[in-house]
Amino acid sequence: MARVLSLFWSQPFLPLAGRTKTTLCKMSMDSRARKVFAAALKAVQPHTVVQQNVERKDDAIIIDGHKFTLQHNLHLVGFGKAVLGMAAEVERIMGDHLVKGVISVPHGIQETLQQHGKHHLLLKENSCIKIIEGAKHNLPDTDAQKAAEEIMHLASELQEKDILLVLISGGGSALLPAPIPPITLQEKLDVTRKLAAAGATIQELNTVRRALSLLKGGGLAHYAHPAQVVALILSDVIGDPLDLIASGPTVQSEVWPEEVLSVLERYNLLHTVPVSVKDVLGRTSPRWKGNKDQTDKAEHVLNVVIGSNSVALMSAGRCVRELGFRPVVLSPGVCGNVRSVSRLYGLLAHFACSREEPPPEIATEVLRLGPEVGVESWDLCRTMQVLGEGRTEGWGATCMLAGGEPTVKLTGKGRGGRNQELALRVGLELRGLDLPPSGPVFLSGGTDGQDGPTEAAGAITDGRLYEEAQAQGLDIDSFLINNDSYTFFSCLSAGKRLVVSGLTCTNVMDVHMLLIPPIPINIG
Ligand SMILES: Nc1ncnc2c1ncn2[C@@H]1O[C@H](COP(=O)(O)OP(=O)(O)OP(=O)(O)O)[C@@H](O)[C@H]1O
Ligand SMILES: O=C(O)[C@H](O)CO
C-alpha cells in the first residue's frame, strides 16, 4: 500500500478542461471540502472494500493474487464494528459455497442499520451466518465472550480442505474476549480498562490483551489449523500493523511477559494486577494446548489489509483533482496532541499562502514539529515543495490531505471530539490569511462519523472563525479550556460548520484536509 500511495502522490497535476473547471468553481470551498470528505468515506465502506479485494472467478476466489478453490468449503467468522456489512458482501459473492459462519458485532447494530435504511449492509434472511451482538459501550461482555467461544468452536472443527474467511475491523478486540483460564472476563476487563483510563496507547493496550487471550495474537489461526485461513482486515491503527489491529487473532505473535509487565508498570498498575493474570504471565508452557499438528502454522494464513486510512486518502485525492485542485498527501499517520497538529497545519497554510517567499523560520518550525506529530521530515519537505510550487508557479489551488488519530488531553467536562477541537484550533491558526474569497478552508472528520461522544463527525473552519465567534458572543478560549468544541460549533451560526455524516459503518481513523484557493501572484 505504501508503494501505491507514493506513486499516487508523485503523479503530475493535470488541470481540468475549462468548462468543467468553471462549473466546479461555482461551488463554495466549504461544499468542496465536504464533497472530498464524502469521497474518502465512500472508498472505505465495508461492502466496497470487500468488492474491491475479493474477485470471484467461476468456482474460485482470488484475493491479493492468491487463488482459492471453492467446494462448499467456505466458513466465515468476523469481529468488529464494520464486520456486518463486510459479511453481507461476502455472502453475496460466495453464494452457496459459504456453509457456516459466526460474527461478533456491536450491540444494536442491526436495528440501527435498519433504521438508517442501510439494508445492503444486512445479511439475507435465511443466512447461514449467525450474528451475535455484544460489547455494549465498546467493552467486552458475556455476549461477546459467547461469540468468541462459538468462533473458537467453529475454527477448531475445520479440516485441511476448508477455508476460513476471517473479517476483522476496529473494535474487534472488545468483540472477541477469550481470557486464558483462570483469568475471568471481569479481571481482564479491569486490567484493560485501567490501562485505557491511564492513557495507554492502542499498541500498549493490545500487547497486554494479546498476552491474556486464547484467540488474540494468532490464537484464532492456531485453532483453525490445518484449514486455510484468509483474513480481510479494515485497519483502524496507524501504520496498519497486522499484529495490533483487533489484537491480531490471525497473526502469530510471541508473548514476552516482561514486555507486558513493563507496560503495566509504566502506568503504575502492577500492584493492581489479579493473581490469575500473574499466574498466566508466569507460565513457561505454550499458550495453547492442542491436539492439532502445530507445524506449518504460518503458511496456511493469509492476512490482507483491504481498507485503511491510505485508501480513504487516495479516494479523497481523486475527488480533489476532479474539483480542480492539486492534491498532496502529507501522511496517513498523523498523531500526537491536537495542539501540535493544529500548529503544524497553521504553519503549512501560512507557507502555502504567503504572497512572497515565506520566511525560513516557518520551514524550520514545521520540521521541528514533525516528530511530535509522527510525520517524517521527508514527507514534510515533499509537502512544502508542492505547496511552494502552487504559490510560485501560479497553477492555483492545492489541497493538503492527511489522516491518522491525534489525541486530546482532556482538561474540561464539555462535549467535543478530537476532530472538532482540531478544526477549532486550526481555525485560529488561519486567522489573518486574507486570500479571496474566504482563504484556506480546513476540515477534520472521523471516518466512523462520530467524533468523541457527539453526533458530528467533525467540523470545517477558516480564517474568519474568530471574528464570526466574537460577533455571536462566543468566547473560543473558554470553549477550548472546557473541551467543549461540539457545543461551540452547535451554537456558532446554527451549526453550519459542523460535519454531520451520520452512521458511516466504517472506521479508518480521521481525515484532515486543507483546501487552498488559487493564490493571486505578486507581479513586480
Ligand atoms: N470533550 C472532548 N473534547 C475533545 N476530545 C474528546 C472529548 N471527549 C472525548 N474526546 C476524545 O475522543 C476520543 C474517543 O472518542 P471516539 O470514541 O471517537 O474514539 P475512537 O478512537 O474513534 O474510538 P473507536 O475507534 O474505538 O471507535 C479520545 O481521543 C478522547 O480524548
Ligand atoms: O479493536 C481494537 O483493538 C482496536 O479497534 C484497534 O484495532
Image: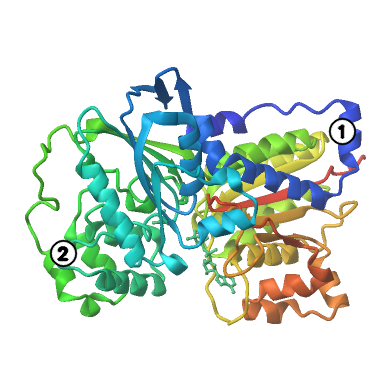
Would you say 432 lies left or right of 224 here? right
Q: Amino acid at mark 2?
A: Pro
Residue 102 on image: x %, y %: 36, 47
Q: Nearer the viewer, residue 491 or 361?
A: 491
Taking the spot 15% from the left edge, 75% from the top edge, the residue there is: 275
Residue 126 visible in the shown view = yes
Q: Secondary structure at mark 1?
A: helix
Eye-nearest disc, 1 or 2: 2
Q: Amino acid at mark 1?
A: Lys
Q: Nearer the viewer, residue 314 or 66?
A: 66
Which residue is at the front of the view, 367 or 16? 16
**SS assignment at label 2:** loop
For label 1, being within 8 Å of ligand 1 is answered: no
- Of all residues shown, which one is farthest toward the front? 126
Q: Which residue is mark 1?
A: 21
* N-terminal label among 1 and 2: 1
Q: Is residue 381 visible?
A: no
- Left or right of 513? Residue 448 is left
Q: Decide: few, some or many residues near mark 1? Use Cα within 10 Å; few <14, some 14-19, many ≥20.
A: some
Name the quadrant where ligand 2 sits.
Answer: bottom left
Which residue lies under the disc numbered 2?
181
Which residue does the image show at 25% across and 52% down from the upper left?
Answer: 215
Q: Residue lying furthest top in this view?
A: 58
Q: Position of residue 175 (x, y in %)?
A: 37, 58
- Residue at 63% across / 80% down in the picture? 481
Residue that appears at 79% across and 64% down = 431
